[in-house]
Image (cartoon, rainbow, N blue to C red):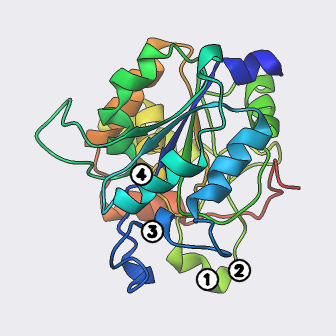
Amino acid sequence: MSTLLDDSVVIVLAGGAGERLFPLTKDRAKPAVYFGGPYRIIDFALSNCINSGLRRIFIATQYKSLSLNRHIRMGWGIVSEELGEFVEILPPQKRVSEHWYQGTADAVYQNLYSIMREGPRYLIVLSGDHVYKMDYARMLQFHNERGAAATLATLEVPKTESHRFGILTVDASDRVIAKRVAEIADERGVPRAQVALAWLCAKPAVTAPIVGATKLEHLADAAAAVELALTPDEVARLEEPYEPHDVVGFA
């Protein structure tokens, strides 16, 4: 397990504006909103990382980030730089285009340079504005044992609330059902991974996708998925089926 953790890099996406929490987000990004006294919402994801044994952490910031930057600087200097550990902020750098972050997948894509310089085998993408407890090490082990290209952590929601979220379908082995993804990929003439990533990466229900970077084509698919826009009909075909399933990695 230690080898898996040492071969992993985390990127926490903390650039969201958080309009639904206004006026709490009037002067700060959603991950920087106070929670339980001196703590911030982002502390849940960061605490999960440290307790899971993950100590190479990037934080992608963008919206009103001063308060968040200060909190990270003052509260999360607990890693050992001499051991290659870090908690490092990544502001938008326009490294690949003239745009700021255009969404979840684009924030990862624009920071591929920083990610690949660390040489990780696994990339763990987390949201910085979710409140939950999770052992990412268990999920990473689950991912590795199944030889998956990507593993997604989701939560079950009541059917009456499902219209507010992105919906996944899984089979009895907890694998994402790929039949409709394959159909759309064949129709478009693109790899299935691109269709799956384009559909899933920006879904609110996804809290911790892990993209296996064991092959260069995995990164190529992730980058291409940013430019792949699914039609409303294609999205409807992918989201229509749903089966409740156990969530891996929760205490």
Q: Amino acid at mark 3?
A: Lys
Residue linked to disc 3 = 30
Element type at marker 2? loop
Q: Which secondary structure, mark 4?
A: helix
**Alpha carbon of mark 3 to alpha carbon of mark 2: how far?**
25 Å
In the rendered image, which quarter contains the C terminus?
bottom right
Q: Where residue 65 sits in the image (x, y, percent)?
A: 35, 58
Q: Quote the CA–CA distance across marks 1 and 3.
A: 22 Å
Please tell me whether mark 1 or mark 3 is closer to you in this view. Answer: 3
Nearer the N terminus, badge 4 or badge 2? 4
* Residue 158: numbered disc: 2
Q: Which residue is mark 4?
A: 69
Pointers 3 and 2 in contact (C-beta within 8 Å): no
The answer, for residue 189, to whether it is visible in the render is no
Where residue 37 appears, x then y in whole percent? 65, 75
Q: Residues within 10 Å of mark 1 (few under 14, many from 20)?
A: few
Nearer the camera: disc 3 or disc 2: 3
- CB of mark 2 within 8 Å of CB of mark 1? yes
Along the line of sight, the residue nearer the viewer: 17 or 146: 17
Q: Quadrant of the N terminus?
A: top right
Secondary structure beneath dot 3 equals: helix
Q: Residues within 10 Å of mark 2 (few under 14, many from 20)?
A: few
